Amino acid sequence: MTTVGFERFGFDSEVPLDALRSIYLRAHYVRSANATSPKPGEKTKEELESDAIYYPDSRSISYSTLTRFPPVKLLSPEKRKRILVTGGAGFVGSHLVDRLMLLGHEVTVLDNFFTGSKTTVGHWVGHPNFELVRHDVVEPYMTECDQIYHLACPASPPHYQFNAVKTVKTSFMGTLNMLGLAKRTKARFLITSTSEVYGDPEVHPQHEEYWGNVNPIGPRACYDEGKRVAETLTYGYHRQDGVDVRVARIFNTYGNTYPVMNPFDGRVVSNFIMQALRGEDMTVYGDGSQTRSFQYIHDLVDGLIALMNSDETRPVNIGSSDEFTIGEFALLVRDIVEKVQKEDGTAPARRVQVIYKPLPTNDPQKRRADTTRAKQVLEWQPRWTVRMGVEEMVRYYKAKMAEGSI
Ligand SMILES: O=c1ccn([C@@H]2O[C@H](COP(=O)(O)OP(=O)(O)O[C@H]3OC[C@@H](O)[C@H](O)[C@H]3O)[C@@H](O)[C@H]2O)c(=O)[nH]1
């Protein structure tokens, strides 16, 4: 595979895969201060990259910023859109931002950096097409824009349960504020909802007409019910005020971010990969018979962009329908990590073991996306197999660990 994205509904989302990889797979150097210096006038590779030099004696670190940005497409003013991405410094947001920037659009990122990090989009700071605003969407925000991707909300179960009240508030107030902005500016509004609106589903696989089975007072409710009410608001503004809306229900997604997908994110894919790479036991919750289907981040970004630019106002599932039990998935990740270690000649003496921990309350027993609608109306379906995506992610984390940056 050499590209991601495609031309659809008059919007071209295709970029070379290597252009994206050059961002998130770029070596993030932590050099030693006493490493040999380049000769005067000599351009080093590092001068074109953000850099961090660690001084062990004083335990301090000095940063330099990029001197050159990745090349972006030059679009005519009619084609260039002003795009607001809330939560643009998060895992999904930063990948979406990379793609929209490479495609040549003007991108404004709003983020409160609660779970996102400035470093995920730091490589665009200073670019004339880019703005980064520290802002919490629970407060109103005014700007002019053509499209709003509303992603802001913690999405990993340990994060969204950390402050349940704030999670509900973010979903409700944040969505209300961004819909108000869409109404005033007549911008098209896309909200990233979630497969968690189906709760612990009684219908399998989950299609968009299913109303779900959510415990409204359980520990996951802040996220599940928060997203459900956010969808309710979205369709309220659509019916009452004619706001042009799109609703993506995102299923489990994994992938790397620059500089790292938070290895302490708490979700299963990063947990398993980090544990296997560190030679620690892999923690399966419950007996591992619960199922999930996992999609790679580039497929999700393709789906979000296709949905935004389509005419579909009904909710659309964006996810994989390749279903694994979590027990099977742990073994697959271990296999891939071992393959990569073997190829690199770093196979450990001891094989990591799978251990079992208690199942979190209300953990959905089965989940698989029914993506019939996405296929029909967006002509979208995942292109990355789990093996391809997980292997890319393993190589990335392994390189970061070798550098000492995680
Ligand atoms: O170390 C771990 C972590 C998780 N798990 C299990 O793996 C499964 C997946 O867990 P994750 O935390 O990755 O994600 P969940 O499916 O529970 O929730 C996710 O659903 C879809 C998205 O909207 C959200 O990003 C997230 O809430 C669960 O059954 C969980 O109990 C483990 O077995 N071990």
Image (tube, rainbow, N blue to C red):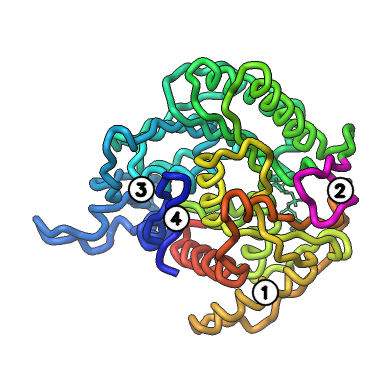
Quote the CA–CA distance across marks 3 and 2: 38 Å
Q: Is 176 drawn above or below residue 16 in the view shown? A: above
Label 1, on which residue? 334
Question: Which amino acid type is marked by label 1?
Answer: Arg
x, y percent for residue 292: 76, 59
Quick one: label 1 or label 2, which is nearer the N terminus? Answer: 2
Question: Which amino acid type is marked by label 3?
Answer: Leu
Query: Element under label 1?
Result: helix
Quote the CA–CA distance across marks 2 and 4: 34 Å
- Give the crowd class for mark 4: few <14, some 14-19, many >=20 residues within 10 Å: some
Q: Residue 146, located in which quarter of the rendered image? A: top left
Task: Identify the magenta region.
Answer: 199-213
Q: Residue 33, located in which quarter of the rendered image? A: bottom left
Quick one: label 2 or label 4, which is nearer the N terminus? Answer: 4
Give the numbered dot on residue 102: 3
**Residue at image x 54%, y 64%?**
393
> Tags 4 and 1 in contact by the CB under 8 Å rule?
no
> Tags 3 and 2 in contact by the CB under 8 Å rule?
no
Query: Element under label 3?
Result: helix
> Tags 1 and 2 in contact by the CB under 8 Å rule?
no
| Residue at the limit of the structure toward the left, as seen here | 41
> Tags 3 and 1 in contact by the CB under 8 Å rule?
no
Instruction: Evaluate whether residue 29 shows in this view.
Output: no
x, y percent for residue 377: 61, 49
x, y percent for residue 25: 42, 60
Give the numbered dot on residue 200: 2
Label 4, on which residue? 6
x, y percent for residue 330: 73, 69
Considering the whole magenta stretch, tell me its main secondary structure: loop
Q: Is residue 212 left or right of residue 368?
A: right
